[in-house]
Image (tube, rainbow, N blue to C red):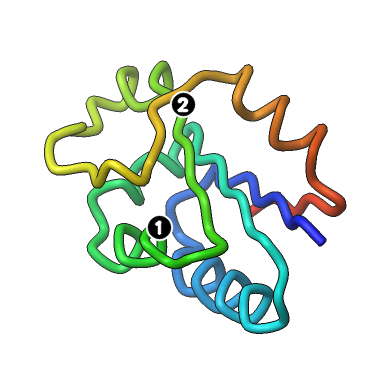
Amino acid sequence: MKLGIIINTGNHLRDLIGISRAAIAKGHEVAAFNMDDGTRMLSEPDFNELCKLKGFSACYCDHSAGILNVSKEGIPAEIVCGSQYNNAVMVDTADKVIVL
């Protein structure tokens, strides 16, 4: 199963990590899309470590990051800079989607 997670707030990092690790441990794939205030997680070391896990993929909305002046410096290569198109693809290919 592929779990899609839309992150549009910046205050659920612990939830994201817990849900993602649990899903991956059960053999599921997790795809995350950060937008709006969720792009603030890009500067969080724990989020960047999560993005390096096998079975986890992440993409963020470049437009949202730009509006919020989120620094793109030091973002790991595993995190894809994208747009709402990436969000739409994730939603379309996921078996289940949750929003944090």
Residue 77 rendering spot, x and y as whole percentages: 28, 41
5 versus 63 height, above or below: below
28 versus 76 height, above or below: below
- Callout in the foreground (1, 2): 1
Q: Quadrant of the N terminus?
A: bottom right
Q: Quadrant of residue 50?
A: bottom left
Which residue: 41% across, 16% down? 63
Query: Residue beneath label 2, please?
Result: 61
- Give the number of callouts: 2
Q: Secondary structure at mark 1?
A: loop
Query: Residue beneath label 1, please?
Result: 51
Q: In the rendered view, does 70 fall on the left or right side of 98?
A: left
Which residue: 50% across, 63% down? 12
Q: Secondary structure at mark 2?
A: strand
Nearest to the observer: residue 84 or residue 52 = 52
Q: In the rendered view, does 52 fall on the left or right side of 36?
A: left
- Identified by mark 2, the residue type is Cys
Task: Mark 1: give few (<14), some (14-19) or many (20+) Cα within 10 Å.
Answer: many
Task: Mark 2: give few (<14), some (14-19) or many (20+) Cα within 10 Å.
Answer: many
Measured in 3D between alpha carbons, the distance from the residue under mark 1 to the one under mark 2, in whole angstroms, is: 16 Å
Q: Quadrant of residue 93?
A: top right
Residue 59 rendering spot, x and y as whole percentages: 48, 37
